[in-house]
Image (spheres, rainbow, N blue to C red):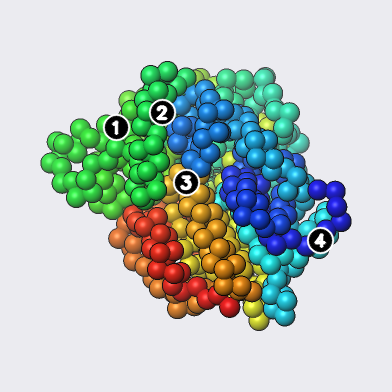
Amino acid sequence: MSDNRTTADCIVVGAGFGGMYLVHRLREAGYSVQGFDAAGDVGGTWYWNRYPGARCDIPSLLYSYSWSDKLRHNFRWSEKYATQPEILEYAQLVADTYDLRPFFRFSTRVESARYDEANCEWVVETDAAGTWRGKYLFLATGCLSVPNEPDFPGQDSFQGDSYQTSTWPHEGVDFSGKRVAVIGTGSSAIQSIPLIAEQAESVHVFQRTPNFSLPALNGPIPEEERQAFEAMYEDYRAALAAGEPGIEMLPEDWEPSDEELAEHVKILWNGGGLVSTVQIPRLTKDERINAAAAEFVRERIQDIVDDPDTARRLTPHGYPIATKRACVDTNYYQTYNLPHVHLVSLQEEPLVEITPQGVKTEAREYPVDAIVYALGFDAMTGALTRINPVGRNGLSLQDAWAEGPTSFLGTTVAGFPNLFTITGPFSPSVIQNVILSIEQHVDWIMEVLARAREAGSATIEITREAQQQWMDHAADEANQTLFPQAGSWYMGANIAGKPRVLMPYVGREYKQKLDANISEGFPGLVFS
Ligand code: NA7
């Protein structure tokens, strides 16, 4: 927009799938909207994560908005698990179809935000568009948007090229003839290593914790599968609306014999990826079920990897499967059978420093031409605490969250009136299809705003009591699971000093609770 406005009813931070759907709905409801994103265009995490092999780990047909038939009919996912360029293309189609770009300022970072209590509005400082004021502030900043920056001794002395998977060069990288080190073995590394290995002269992978990875069995979507999905689409949408997962499931109280269990966990190898983990009832709750699934994957690793020592080091132990997000790969374990690909276990030889020539562990120095850091993200709260909104009585979010995040439903925080988070902590967010999580939050927020508009309210705020009740309930649900046993980014364990708490809400009936909150007249929310 080329006007000189510096106010809007609604300020939206983030032009990923959360921000785009929200802006669309806000506009439709007649609010004035100003969005900001530090990226040069829409796409959120898919704008930045351009590393080789970057893909969705949810089937593409499901990783799509369910609110627009127009988009569904105008976009054809080509593969079962879509590539980053294709997902970005989809995001661009969303922006084009609903004319969303004029409502965003790109290449503009929101640096801070403060609630002006006297005027009941948020004051937002940006790096490229000055100061903005808005009645409502929406942080659609994504769960995986703030990179865990490398901080190794000596890293600035490295004379080769350094890359981060999460901020990959737009022009791509050619590793032909290069000796490459990859540090990290999360999803980003597991997706990129097989492709880097296709080009590089040698690859050394520095692994701190082995991950469980499931085969994607990726490929073009067969026409009959596409048609079958179309045929059941309305049922699928109805299931989601009712708060059901919309995928085939066994009953939650399934009590298999050991033989039945051993047979059923084989679905982890059928290409369903994360969906297949959900199709094993109580996988993240029941030790016996989890152990059988974990053992099945361990055996597959032993089958695939030729060198027994490499297989042993690749085999995850010490935490239940799926309590760190399982990875979905194409030829990851197979890649270690290539003679020029080597696995270095940082548990056996801890990393000491980066030298001008390469990577030095306690055992030896590995000379390389390029280092790829695949270290993950300050997940779920990182983007929120970096903006660090200051709410009532001058309390900042960082201070409010010093002992760990707080939230009601993952959408709003006590002490921060008129502020909403999309896929915030204590909502399912990354535990379910995140596009679905986004839609649930935006839809709930629109109901809340409608109520405020009807009542002529200046502020919307959750009470501390209601927030505490939700947090207690979320903790209860978390404690019935195996998730707290893993040092995962779900638990904040990948970032030094971050409070350890299971951030995604893992109860089963989240959508039902959102719906009940609406139908019961928003208990806990104060409209004044
Ligand atoms: P992840 O899954 O957080 O993986 C990061 C990896 O980097 C993981 O193997 C970490 O080991 C490793 N790491 C982090 N810090 C270090 C240091 N200091 N030294 C050595 N190794 C380190 O991030 P991704 O980007 O791969 O994937 C994130 C999500 O994106 C993924 O779950 C999908 O949802 C998509 P650790 O396990 O912490 O020992």
Q: Earlier in the sequence, mark 4 or mark 2?
A: 4
Q: Earlier in the sequence, mark 3 or mark 2?
A: 2
- Rounded to the nearest angstrom, the CA distance separating label 4 from label 3 is 32 Å
Tell me if mark 1 has few (under 14), some (14-19) or many (20+) residues whose alpha carbon lies within 10 angstroms of its own: some
Q: Is 221 on the left-hand or right-hand side of 36? A: left
The residue drawn where x is 41% and y is 28% is 230
| Quarter-of-image position of residue 312 | top left
Q: Earlier in the sequence, mark 3 or mark 1?
A: 1
Q: Nearest to the eye among marks 3 and 1: give it.
A: 3
Residue 421 on image: x %, y %: 57, 60
Q: Is mark 1 within 8 Å of ligand 1?
A: no
Type of amino acid under label 3: Leu
The residue drawn where x is 40% and y is 55% is 511
Q: Secondary structure at mark 4?
A: loop
- Rounded to the nearest angstrom, the CA distance separating label 1 from label 2 is 24 Å
- Rounded to the nearest angstrom, the CA distance separating label 4 from label 1 is 54 Å
Q: Secondary structure at mark 3?
A: helix
Q: Nearest to the eye among marks 4 and 1: give it.
A: 4
Q: Which residue is mark 2?
A: 230
Answer yes or no: do the residues labelled 1 and 2 have beta carbons within 8 Å? no
Residue 143: mark in rendering: none
Type of amino acid under label 1: Ile
Q: Which residue is mark 3?
A: 436
Type of amino acid under label 2: Glu
Residue 192 on image: x %, y %: 56, 31
Q: Secondary structure at mark 1?
A: helix
Q: Which residue is mark 1?
A: 267
Q: Is 101 on the left-hand or right-hand side of 400? A: right
Residue 6: mark in rendering: 4
- Rounded to the nearest angstrom, the CA distance separating label 3 from label 2 is 18 Å
